[in-house]
Image (cartoon, rainbow, N blue to C red):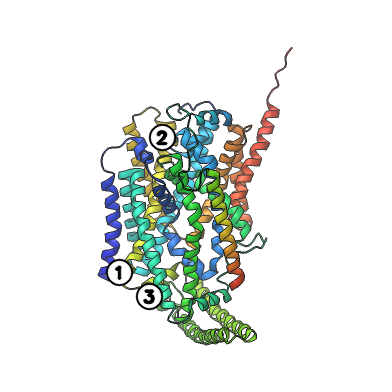
Amino acid sequence: MTPLDYVVLVGVIVGIAAYGIWRTRGPRNLSAYLKGDQTMGWGAVGISVMATQASAITFLSTPGQGYQDGLGFVQNYFGLPLALILICAVFLPIYRRLNVYTAYEYLGRRFDAKTRLLGAVLFLLQRGLAAGITIYAPAIVLSTVMGWRLDFTILCSGLIAIVYTVCGGTEAVSITQRYQMAIIFAGMIAAFGVLLAKLSRSVSLTDALGLAGAFNKMRAVDFSLNMDRRYTLWSGLLGGLFLALSYFGTDQSQVQRYISGASLRESRLGLMFNAVCKIPMQFFILLLGALLFVFYQFERPPVFFNETAWKYQTEHGAGAELRGLEQKFAAAYDQKLEKINAWIKARHSGNPALETQARAAAVAELDRTEAVREEVRAVLRKASPHASANDSDYIFITFILHHLPHGIIGLLVAVFFAAALSSKASELNALGSTTTVDVYRHIVKTNASDAHYVAASRWFTLFWGFVALAFALSANLVENLIQAVNILGSVFYGVVLGLFVVAFFIRRVGGTAVFWAALAAQALVFILYFTLSISYLWYNFIGCAGCVVFSLALQAVLDAARPVRRAY
Amino acid sequence: MKPSAAPASPEDLRRQEALGESGGVIQDESTGVPGFRAWRAIYWFVLGSLALWITLLALLTRALS
């Protein structure tokens, strides 16, 4: 990065945060602090909901996912529009009309205090951990490639979000998210444009898509019924529906965004905006990854995209072995390029038999280069068992640093920080609100002034900010980052959704039955998670279904055990 | 612990929901979107766009894999 890139990066990030603080200066009551006085239009609600979901991981890790596994991850989002329709039709009108601060307040009104507390605690547990990941995940990648200290990167991104969220509450979060999303869209469009321009020097877009397809990167929809496959149409529709229903319907970080709409109409339209835009947005980010894969067929990629880890290992211990593999990779790459060019030539020859033959040869060469990359990973794992040998999160940032013009590099790094801050701020805002409303005001101090609760909310937001920072400073992840967040969510979300499904739709179940049923369902999800190898998306369904079935069974037992009054 | 309100049945809540913060009845608002008079029409539009995306992606998969 040059000084120009640093000026763009610091200017964008600090400028937006300072503007958010300035716009929300002055005293505010609890409603204004937690719900922004409900003045947001549908566009602001829609952007805020989108920015909350789209963290830095989305923009850093998803192109890597597209590079590695192709477009299949897009199926994860097929259930989202269905979930948002259900939320607009059922959940949202109830939240709005009961005028709640948090989703868990509704559980208290429908059931009892302990069920409300259980919902709030499950949220705090899951979101508290996820908040650490949303800081740690981009920081680990950015610090590695930029050569910055990891703790410095975590503290910088974490502290900026903490300061403006504590100062301005929900309104500051929403205001900053608008500008952060504008930067994100501008940066991603710029990266896509540069990639297409660079790609066109080697290959036409039609050939690029054909090449990606030949190497299985364009398999967007998988109709397979195999439960072991992570992303299929069915796991996306059903598991994705439950994941999105739990996330958007019951996770306070999202509920807080859309209940702050100026009216039911604005909140609904904001959600419908996301229902229509989310799949195309994810598709284009994954397509960017698939096209990056094609780009690196014509431009020799590093044998391992985490170049810092590579450099460290070549200088310490496994150097000779890795350098040998690097030469083997270079030779395999040259062979592959030759076969790919032959395949493109065959494509244009109009001879299908020749094309099939050339394609098979190119695929065989790709397998050879991938085998070398796998050997490299094995050596790195052996040399450093605790370090991650997964380099897919480093693919996009490597492209940015090596192939984008200066200024745009600063803008793209600002994209990652903006995305990290926007989702982080929403999470902190929600964690602070839930702790204040569902725990502190509900249990600890029940009759204090509005100003007292605003101050408490600020302190709790600060507390959760430091918890997230502490978690991020001590974390170590081996999964692809975007999957790690989804896995963590899937383990908890299903049960929380189950609580709400029973509340909304099963009138005969009471608080005691649903409370114990939720605990049993959560235990079941934990046991299955550690014993089965099914796609994590299914845990959303299992947790929800378990909670509903156990609730019905337990309520039946309680009803049967209740003494029957007899008239004598 | 703050005494919570007596547990309410969904019917009680629905009655409560029908009353706004001011105690007046809240009507389901119009969409305000030209061409979509009812929310149901917007939901059908979203479902249609989902079906269209899945179809296009399935065709893309078929054409390029």
Which one is in front, A111 or A18?
A18
Are the residues under badges 3 and 2 in a single subunit? Answer: yes
Judging by the rendered image, the residue that carries numbered circle 2 is A440
Residue A459 in view of the camera:
yes
The picture places residue A200, in percent across and down from the top left corner, at: 44, 79
* Residue A505 falls in image quadrant: top right
**Chain bearing mark 3:** A
Instruction: Report in which chain the residue with disc 1 lies.
Output: A
User: Compared with residue A436, is residue A494 higher up or lower down, i.e. above or below?
Assistant: below
Q: Is residue A559 left or right of residue A432?
A: right
Which residue matches tag 3?
A403
Residue at image location 56% in from the left, 28% down from the top: B12
Confirm or deny contact between disc 3 and disc 2 (CB under 8 A): no
Label 1: state its secondary structure.
loop
- The first of marks 2 and 1 along the sequence is 1
Q: Nearer the viewer, mark 3 or mark 2?
A: 3
